[in-house]
Amino acid sequence: MNDTLEVTDLRVTFRGGLVAADGVSLRVAPEETLAVVGESGSGKTTVARCVVGLQRPDSGTLTFDGQPLGPVGRRPPELQRAIQMVFQDPRSSLNPRMPVADLIGEAWRTHPAAAPPGDRTEALHRLLADVGLDADVTGRRAGDLSGGQCQRVSIARALAVGPRLLVCDEAVSALDVSVQAQILRLLVDLRRTHRLALLFITHDLGVVHQIADRVAVMRGGAVVEEGPAGEVLGAPRHEYTQALLDAALDLGVDE
Ligand SMILES: Nc1ncnc2c1ncn2[C@@H]1O[C@H](COP(=O)(O)OP(=O)(O)OP(=O)(O)O)[C@@H](O)[C@H]1O
Ligand SMILES: [Mg+2]
């Protein structure tokens, strides 16, 4: 099937024998959002890193559009472009000294096939408008922007190369609650306008219903429950999912 991410029986063991992924299987269809939730240490980032090719699994297969997904450096350029990642902390994933125009330009240098053929300034301004930033941020350095603006730049940089799947690892967790809501809305909009699939990783069940079509619940390196968001959040089958929901309600984050 076109543009579908398929992860099958993924296993990752770290030195010392810690099993971070213990037979994980996931599927993300084109333009679909799968939320992966679970407590700290459940293996969410490990799975994300395998998907973007930063972590090599011990066994299991990963494919996108039927093509095998190896380590990022061995992926053909169009496959590298197709899967982009947005990290939790934009302040550490963006060079604070680089102006926004150069940060986006860097993405186009890495992937010349994705660079706009004509006027780059116009393409840059269009991209910034897509993520809700004014054209006047182009000359500002990442270090001088707010956390929310930085995360918008990270998203613009990912979009610059024309991805089909965006892997967001706790992409809103470091932001203030009001900014969190804005970035979530932006992702929901971009998903539609740019026809993106999202692998949305979060420990925060409170944000899942705003964005996810389906939810996979991870615990101890394994997926314990998976299904449509309404079903998993509304009538969880696994006691661990129920415990996560209860914890979210206790914190008041589900209001
Ligand atoms: N490079 C590594 N070397 C050794 N152990 C690691 C490494 N990376 C992760 N781990 C361990 O693997 C397990 C899964 O970690 P992972 O980062 O995937 O969890 P997570 O669900 O993303 O947690 P969090 O919500 O805190 O981000 C944890 O026990 C973690 O300590
Ligand atoms: Mg993590």
Image (spheres, grey):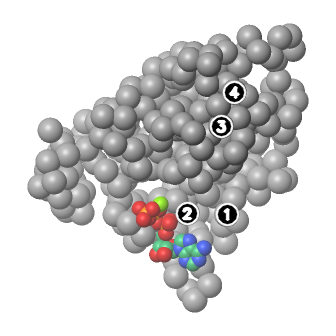
Q: Please, what is the three-letter code of the amino acid marked with disc 1? A: Gln
Give the mark nearer the N terminus: 1 vs 2.
Answer: 2
Give the mark nearer the N terminus: 4 vs 2.
Answer: 2
Q: Please, what is the three-letter code of the amino acid marked with disc 3? A: Arg
Mark 4 C-beta closer than 8 Å to ligand 2 = no
Say above or below: 193 vs 20: above
Residue indicated by mark 2: 46
Give the mark nearer the N terminus: 4 vs 1.
Answer: 1
Marks 3 and 2 sit apart, C-alpha to C-alpha, by 31 Å
Viewport quadrant of the N terminus: top right
Query: Where is residue 135 drawn, in percent x and y?
Result: 62, 16
Q: Please, what is the three-letter code of the amino acid marked with disc 2? A: Thr
Frontmost of labels 3 and 2 is 3
Q: Which of the 4 image quadrants contains residue 156?
A: top right
| Residue pictured at 45% horizontal, 25% vertical | 186
Residue indicated by mark 4: 139
Dot 1 falls on a residue whose secondary structure is: loop
Q: Nearer the viewer, residue 38 or 225?
A: 38
| Residue pictured at 52% horizontal, 82% vertical | 18
Residue indicated by mark 3: 141
Query: Where is residue 234 drawn, in percent x and y?
Result: 18, 41
Mark 3 C-beta closer than 8 Å to ligand 2 = no
Q: Disc 1 vs disc 2: Cβ atoms closer than 8 Å?
A: yes
Q: Disc 4 vs disc 2: Cβ atoms closer than 8 Å?
A: no
Marks 4 and 3 sit apart, C-alpha to C-alpha, by 7 Å
| Residue pictured at 75% horizontal, 49% vertical | 68
Q: Please, what is the three-letter code of the amino acid marked with disc 4? A: Gly
Residue indicated by mark 1: 55
Mark 1 C-beta closer than 8 Å to ligand 1 = yes
